Image: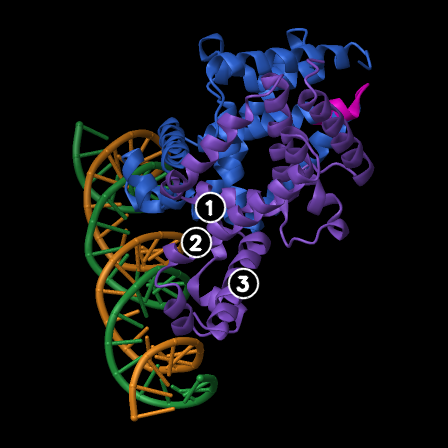
Chain colours: A blue, B purple, C orange, D green
DNA sequence: GAGAACAAACCGTCTGGTCGGTACAGAGAG
DNA sequence: CTCTCTGTACCGACCAGACGGTTTGTTCTC
């Protein structure tokens, strides 16, 4: 694959991502993606032969970025649960601290792909299932899951801009979640 | 409005609800709703002159049912936060205990409407915003929001069937959330 | 019989995908 | 060096089906 081809593909993925995040899945049409990326529709379909292929590529890129960030957070000395919390915290609340171009909100944005059509969901369900099953093997599975759910719910609320908490409260929520995550990682059953 | 008309309308709303929950918003087409409800497309558009009108009716019915259940839970002696937790618990985990035909999962299913098009969201955002703003006026706003987010995240996970917890764990999670909700409602800052 | 309730054919638009063609950068032959 | 050939990258007109909505006609109820 040539360099030129790579650049165009990235432009297309970026364009599709922007559209989903700013205008919703409903506006994610091939024409719109091509137009936003500054490529013709034919050019788009040359690289991604179907809309499905495009969606698959987007989600794969997202998962890769997400995994890299998660592993780098663990490498920095965070326990598994705390790393998970910071995965959401890092770029969402402190974007300036993150060098990786990944926003946790994207994850939620792409969950909306699942919402649009259950068939899409089946394709990536397995990967997520195995991750979260492993994620429950902590000193306090109940609290671990509460933390996970809370973060997902929070991101969803942010994404849809529904009943959002003021920044100060948001900060306190994250702080308390991190505190509990630390306790779990260090083996305290609270 | 005649009795016959009422029945048809309910059938249409039920059909639309079923489609959203089982196949996703993408498959919510007028033809499909009419077919599922056993009514012709013309019949559908007689009662709901546009797709938007149908969606509005669905969401309004959902909100009404949700509010009734929430208030009845408070009338049963639950504090505001505990009532909120039981709102999710009641029909989802103990459907046999509920007389009201409302599933908390529906709430999440309809959040997916927001996902499809941000324009839909604006219409109902206000109601949800005022509810959740009031909801933060408790003895421990941070914990209150964590509970709320956790429940929403849990329902989302259930709806998309992604990384779901086994029933026993789910039961323990709810139990712990209820315990904390009680503490908040009784004024303990934990 | 009159109006409410419903049926079904039809229409315009939008959208995913096809297809024939173009631009251009090398490779190889003479 | 140049002429031809080939494969990659891209363009844009076009098509078929799906979908929301209209129109016209029919049946049921009071």
Q: Position of residue A154 (x, y in %)?
A: 55, 26
In the foreground, B92 or B31 = B92
- What subunit carries mark 3? B
Tell me if label 1 and label 2 are in contact, CB under 8 Å: yes
Q: Is residue A162 visible?
A: no
3D distance between C-alphas at marks 1 and 2: 9 Å
In the foreground, A47 or A182 = A182
Query: In percent of the image, x 61 and y 38: which residue is there?
Result: B156
Q: Quadrant of the N terminus of chain A?
A: top left
B40 lies above or below A6: below
Q: Check disc 3 and report the residue beneath it.
A: B15
Q: Position of residue A74 (x, y in %)?
A: 66, 12
Query: In percent of the image, x 39 and y 30: which residue is there?
Result: A14
- Left or right relative to C12: residue A74: right
Q: Quadrant of residue D2?
A: top left
Main structural element of the magenta stretch: helix, strand or loop? Answer: helix
Residue A119, label in figure: none
On whether residue A143 falls in the magenta region, the answer is yes
Query: In percent of the image, x 47 and y 57: which residue is there?
Result: B28
Q: Check disc 2 and report the residue beneath it.
A: B55
Residue B113, label in figure: 1
Q: Secondary structure at mark 3?
A: helix
Q: Is residue B105 visible?
A: yes
B112 lies above or below B23: above
In the foreground, A155 or B122 = B122
In the foreground, A162 or A125 = A162
Q: Quadrant of the C terminus of chain A?
A: top right
Whether labels 1 and 2 share one chain: yes
How many labels sit on residues?
3
Q: Secondary structure at mark 2?
A: helix
Sequence-first tag of 2 and 3? 3
Chain part drawn in magenta: A138-145
């Amino acid at each position: 694959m040539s360099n030129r081809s790579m650049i165009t593909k990235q432009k297309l993925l970026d364009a599709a991502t922007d559209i989903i995040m700013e205008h919703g899945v409903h506006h994610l049409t091939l024409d719109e993606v091509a137009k936003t990326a500054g490529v013709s529709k034919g050019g788009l379909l040359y690289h991604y032969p179907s809309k499905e292929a495009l969606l698959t590529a987007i989600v794969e890129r997202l998962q890769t970025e997400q995994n890299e960030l998660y592993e780098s957070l663990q490498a920095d000395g965070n326990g598994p649960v705390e790393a998970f919390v910071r995965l959401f915290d890092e770029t969402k609340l402190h974007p300036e601290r993150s060098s990786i171009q990944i926003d946790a909100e994207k994850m939620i944005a792409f969950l909306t792909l699942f919402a649009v059509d259950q068939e899409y969901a089946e394709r990536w369900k397995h990967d997520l299932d195995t991750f979260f099953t492993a994620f429950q093997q902590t000193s306090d599975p109940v609290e671990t899951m509460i933390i996970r759910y809370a973060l997902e719910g929070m991101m969803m609320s942010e994404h849809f801009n529904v009943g959002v908490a003021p920044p100060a409260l948001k900060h306190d929520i994250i702080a308390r979640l991190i505190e509990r995550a630390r306790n779990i990682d260090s083996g305290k059953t609270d």
